[in-house]
Image (cartoon, grey):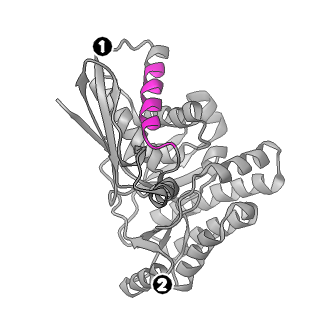
Amino acid sequence: MIIHKTAYPRAAVIGNPSDGYFGKTIAFVFDNYQAEVQLYETPEISFLSASRDVNVFDDLEDLDRKIKLYGYYGGIRLLKAASRTFFIYCREHGITLEKKNFTIRYQSSIPNRLGLAGSSAIITAAMRALAEFYNVDMPPARLANIVLAAERDELSIPAGLQDRVAQAYNHPVFMDFDRNFMETNGFGKYDKINLPEEINFFVAYRTDLAEGSEILHSRLKDDYLAGDKKVLDAIEEWADLTCRMRKAVENKDFGVIPSLMNRNFDLRSEVCANSISEKNRRMVEIARSCGASAKFTGSGGAIVGTFEDEAMFEKLKKELKFFDVEVIKPHIVTTGEA
């Protein structure tokens, strides 16, 4: 029997990047793209390559293009990290695994290295497949922690919990990473929320720009650990914006949402100006010039925002297309745990 598991890209609606610093965020996943993992029993453990793992290229131009797109390391490392982290988790929690092996492979249509959590989607799908294969119960809050451990501890990728929580719950989530609660329970306070269809979200991403989240997170972490007042104040404000967003959604006060999302990015610009590239900033500026709100979905490469009507959406697509930016309406996943 072949086990098929999927996970989806994430869009951080508001609050990011405070999730790594005991803040608050709201995020959703959307199924316009997906990462899929297939796993089946075999005599030995084997990891099969996908398109981003190739080591043979047509020429130097092809090599250059694919390294820009996928980086140097591909996706096999994600499957290996997921498998080892899963094993360590089970060993530390006294979970006895059946003596059997597997072959695992992945494929992903999620635009790579653009702040849409494509790497954690692959790991999340892999964890789900491993949990089913070995019959291990993995509640979503715990799944998010294990996925983060695979990236942070095994692969040294600076990251927070937000992406993994949204992907684990398969539903829009309000996340409160209260320090005391997390230190006591090992995870944050996660509440599923509804994002009404009256809120017209768009997601846009560059087709010519791929960059990891390491640069921004590393700099922000250094300033946070140094007790930089500007950074600490920003984290508090990001958390406050998140609470105000939740209240606006609950009260159907949708008119204030654009200003909250815009402020999220403006504050990021004030605190992390040196880590925002000109192309990324331009993407936000063009969207706003069309009348839309806009902020990063993650750490750059893609943005999320709101638009008023179809005329504005068509204008967004037209204006951003000139700058190699693709614009979509995200189909938000609300199916719950998978």
- Write down the quadrant of residue 123 in the picture: top left
Residue placed at 63% from the left, 65% from the top? 264
Screen quadrant of the N terminus: top left
| Residue at image point 46% right, 14% down | 91
Q: Amino acid at mark 1?
A: Glu
Seen in the picture, residue 172 relative to 92 is either above or below; the reply is below
Alpha-carbon neighbours of circle 1 within 10 Å: few (<14), some, or many (≥20)? few
Residue 299 visible in the displayed image: yes
Disc 2 residue type (three-letter): Glu
Q: Is residue 83 magenta?
A: yes
Q: Position of residue 223 (x, y in %)?
A: 78, 49
The x and y percentages for residue 23 are 64, 48
- Taking depth in this image into account, of 254 and 17 the one nearest to the observer is 17
Whether tag 1 and tag 2 are in contact, CB under 8 A, the answer is: no
Return the x and y of residue 232 as percentages of the image width and height.
76, 52
Q: Which residue is mark 2?
A: 319
Real-space Cα separation, disc 1 to disc 2, in angstroms:
55 Å
Given residues 203 and 68, the one toward you in this image is 68
* Above or below for 264 versus 174: below
Instruction: Give x and y (percent) for residue 214.
Output: 63, 48
> Does 259 appear above or below 215?
below
Residue occupying the point 82% across, 46% down: 227
The quarter of the displayed image where residue 111 is located: bottom left
Q: Main secondary structure of the magenta part?
A: helix
What SS does tag 2 mark?
A: helix
* Left or right placement of residue 106 versus residue 11 in this view: left
Regarding mark 1 in the picture, which secondary structure is present there? loop
Please provide the residue range marked out in magenta.
73-89
Q: Is residue 327 magenta?
A: no
Residue identified by numbered label 1: 98
Which residue occupies the foreground of this view, 199 or 159? Answer: 159
